[in-house]
Amino acid sequence: MDYFAGVDIGSTMTKVVIMGEEEVVISLVRVTTPEQRKLANKVMEEALEKASLSFDEITYVIATGYGRINVAFADKQITEISCHARGVASLIPAVKTIIDIGGQDSKGIKLSGGKVVGFVMNDKCAAGTGRFLEITARALGVKLEEIGELSLTARNPAEISNTCTVFAEQEVINKLAGGVPLNDILAGLHQAIASRIASLVSRLGIEREVMVTGGGAKNVGLVKALESKLDLPVLIPPDPLLTGAIGAALLGRDLVKKAKNEGLPVTKRQRSLEEVKFFA
Amino acid sequence: MAEQKWPEKYPVEGKRGRKYGTVAAMRVAPMVKAAIGGAVEAKAQGKAIAYCFIESNYDEIIRAMDIVPMWTENYAGICGAKRDTQRFLDKADSLGFSRSLCTYATCGLGFDAWREELGSMPPEAPWGGQARPDVMLSSGQIICDPRNKWYQAVQQFMPDVPVYNCAALWPLYEDDIDRREVEPYYVKYLAEDLRGLVRFLEEHLHGKMDWDRLWEVIKLADETTDLHAECRELRKAVPTPMDTGDAMNTMVPQAFMMGTQEAHDFYRDLRDELKYKVERGLGVIPEEKYRLIWPGGLPSWFALMDFNYFWSKGAVFPVESTYNELVYPARELDLPRTDDPLEYMAWRWMRRQTYWWDKARKRPGSEPDVEKLITWIEEYKIDGVVIHEAYSCRSWHVGLLWQVNQLAKIYKPIPVLILKEDRKEVEYRELPSLVLESDMIDISSYSEAETRAKIDAFIETLESIKSRKVEV
């Protein structure tokens, strides 16, 4: 029995998926910290323990996410663009546009026949990312996981004119001090971020079906605001944080399968489940 | 990646990753350094210095009159390549110039303001600094919007230095306009404008134009362009013997030394080197997987190593539009006969600017810049497009996005059945594009990690598209 692992090190969350030939055996999501990145092997060890597997039983490991270079025990590094595409295509092949809203960046991926044909990334500015909501939620004294639901109760969404996260933080504090209801402010914030993301992804030419992944997909207020901006419904995977890691594991499986079919040896790195050394 | 058997005639550079770069490109930095230092020296000897902009159709005039050009955009680029722009940008910022302006201009303004304040070059100015001009030759060439205002603004610090505004214009493309109907008006205007420039230079620099010498310089410049165009043709070979990373250096003689023997000899040597390599199948990288086009726009001068990163992924750029705008041999332009060198220069300028018009008119919805790219995409066997949105280069920025969108309409991801001799193949003739974002010299806008993450994802996209080629 072959097992395949996908390790997705995002800016806020580290995700590990181990799968067999067909199904996911175990998945794990942990908070990314600088120490966590240094110790990606620990998360992998935890996943292996839960799956009652040893590292030697993993046929192929693919690392993805912006911290993929920190996964010294991976056989191959592949960008999150390709991994998300593979993961989403396996879940719903009809998807042609992916909107991934992560902690540090947001991106759009265009698919054709399950393959990536174009992508855009917002990596220059926190506006349009999970970080934007995280910072403003903190400024408003609301828990991040509550802001989506709260925003849906708004009657008159406030207009947030600043697209700069730092200035937007000040703007929402001023609005709160000026008596604007919290839910209206939150609705305005969600509309602002949805607008940024919609503009970014529109460069690709949005085609249905559209799937939203990443932590942002777990925010119902943001998803609704995005649907309103795009004027179409979006799909949310069962666990939107895991599509990249699932895709990584699947790409590993694809590579091994292809090699076997062609009678070629599987090229693997000399690997051991240790932390990366270049931090020392 | 496999090694190539490399001839001793063209030694491998082997430093800074530019393993298979051209030997000719290695000559460029010393040439530019000598020109910058030479201008400072010439100033000390009392020779006339002119601030100049490239591609402004006055190169031969200044060379024929022995005026030493100081290319201000080039100097800003040098500061960028040496990662020494911040202090000049900060200086301009302190004077109230917006950070949204062209950073070439703000770098130059900061430099000039500082030099004028000190009465000498700013400390440790890159390559000896930018020599103080006697005249400034501005340009209305429409690709760069800040040019006219730049030298006007510089006059705040150097009110004694006169400015001549060259029109260097051309008609904007309309598919229902035949260029032949409008060209004579523009040519008449351009020739008069150049006559005005000659009078301005004679008056302010107390020299006289030698018209026979001007014809000689024009002839030399035309021969130089012919050689440069030959170099571009040779790059069509697979594997390509030279890519855009090198072309961003080898453009220097064309852009900054036109009308000199040095520029002519440079392209003769480059042509010979490329011929030699093509005949022996020597490429920038031995195993080309992907051939890309740089459709225009300025690179990040401080991050030219990103081209090497593409090489490490098996990707090369056999052609680019940047600095190739005017590299069309005069013999291909069907120029009317004239005894007036200024009229000749006006016709040549006009015909080079309208070079792609006729072809574009044959394709509904096309446009000359797009037509040029389509032609090159086919001729150079291009797999993908990479553009750089330099945030402070506004005019190019806007046009590039439009061009990429037009190309996306033509190269749609649709299956095309190709009949080969012994088989049928389904090809998805599509052309993915990558948009890099930064600036030409403002390093604060650049992130190496993010740029390379985008390149990685783009290479995976190219790989994914290639894997969709199915034999049926």
Image (cartoon, coloured by chain):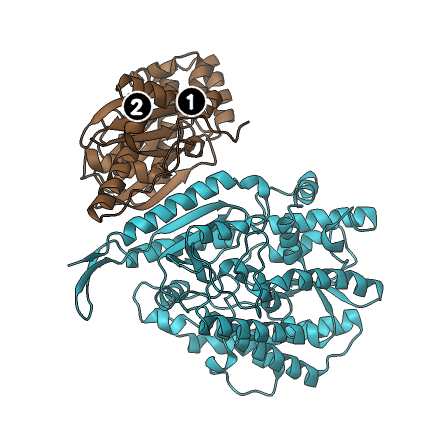
Q: Which label's residue is closer to the chain start, 1 or 2?
A: 1
Give how far across and how far down residue B399 sits, in percent: 44, 55
> In terms of image quadrants, where is residue A128?
top left
User: What is the count of numbered marks?
Assistant: 2
Residue A187 seen in the figure:
no
Q: Nearer the viewer, residue A114 or B103?
A: A114
Kindly identify the amino acid type of the residue bearing the numbered disc 1: Thr
Which residue is rendered at x = 41% and y = 65% of the image? B239
- Quarter that holds the N terminus of chain B: bottom left
* Residue B324 left/right relative to A199: right
Residue A32: assigned label:
1
Please give the residue where the numbered disc 2 appears in the rendered image: A54
C-alpha span from label 1 to label 2 = 23 Å
Q: Chain of mark 2?
A: A
The disc numbered 1 marks a residue on which chain?
A: A
Q: Nearer the viewer, residue B424 or B96?
A: B424
The residue nearer to you, when weighing B253 against A135, is: B253
Q: Colour of chain A?
A: brown
**Label 2 Cα neighbours within 10 Å, binned few <14 / some 14-19 / many ≥20:** few
Q: Could you tell me which secondary element the residue under label 2 belongs to?
A: loop
